[in-house]
Amino acid sequence: MTKLLRIDASARTSRSLTRALADSFTLGWHERRPEDEIILRDVGRNPPPIVTENWIAAAFAKERTPDQEQLLALSDELIAEVASADIIVMATPMYNYGMPAALKAWFDQVVRVDKTFTFDLARGDAPLEPVFWGKTLILLTSFGEFGFAPGGPNEGRDSLTPHVRTASRYLGVEAFHHVGIEYQEFGDERFEASHKAAFAALAPLVDTLVNALAPRPAPDAAEALAGL
C-alpha cells in the first residue's frame, strides 16, 4: 500500500484553486488505487505555530524536560506523517511571491535536526544530510500573475517553487512534479486556458506515478531463457 500526504496551505476554504487541484489529483489517485491511504494535513485552516527561542532550545536539547517534549509534540506528529508518506501532495497558492506563512511554519516544524536531517562537520562544506529518501512531491500552485519562467515578464520573482524544491530535499524528496495555474487575478481567457491545462495535466500525472508503482510481471520461461 502506498501512502499519500496531502498538505493544503491556502487560507481560503472555498473558491481555492489549489484545493480544487488537490481534490482532483487525490480523486484520480483513489479511483486508480482505492486501497492506498491519503493523510490530510490542512495548514491553511490550522496553521502550525511559528518557531520560537524556546522551541529551538527544545529541538537542540540532548535531554529534554517534559515541557520541551510537549513543545515539540506537534513537530513530532508532522514529521511522523512525512516519514510514513511515499508521495507528498502539496497544494499552495503564491502569497507575495513566496509561500504562505502557514506553509513556512509547517516546513520549520518539520525540517529538524536529528529528525529529518543530520548535521556533521566531518562532511566538510556540506554538513547536512537528509534522513529520509525516495519520496515524490507533487506541487500544485496558483499564481495571481504569470510569466515566472525564464524569459517571462516575472522571471526571477517566483520564490515559492524554488523554496519548496530546496526545502523538500529534507523531506526525503527525490522526484519533483509541478502543476500550476497562472493569470488568476486577470480572470481572462488566458486564465481559463491555464486553468484548463493544469487540470488536464493531473490525470496523465496520476497515470505516470501509478504505472511507476506497478510491479513488473515476471518473465515467462521462454523470455527467461532468451535472456541467458
Image (tube, rainbow, N blue to C red):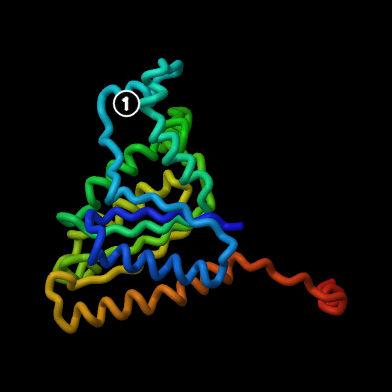
Q: In what quadrant of the picture does the N terminus appear?
A: bottom right
Say which of 164 and 78 sits in front.
78
The answer to whether residue 103 is left or right of residue 202 is left
Q: In what quadrant of the picture does the C terminus appear?
A: bottom right
Residue displayed at 42% across by 44% down:
170
| Secondary-structure class at tag 1 | helix
Residue displayed at 41% across by 15% down:
65
Residue displayed at 45% across by 16% down:
63
Q: Position of residue 149 (x, y in %)?
A: 24, 68
Say which of 137 and 129 sits in front.
137
Q: Residue furthest front?
A: 14
Q: Position of residue 182 (x, y in %)?
A: 22, 71
Q: Position of residue 193 (x, y in %)?
A: 25, 82
Say which of 172 and 121 sits in front.
172
Residues packed near mark 1 inside 10 Å, few (<14), some (14 to 19) or many (20 plus): some
Residue displayed at 29% across by 22% down:
54
User: What residue type is disc 1 on?
Assistant: Ile
Whether 68 is drawn above or below 30: the answer is above
Say which of 167 and 36 sits in front.
36
Pointer 1 residue: 56
Q: Position of residue 21 (x, y in %)?
A: 34, 68
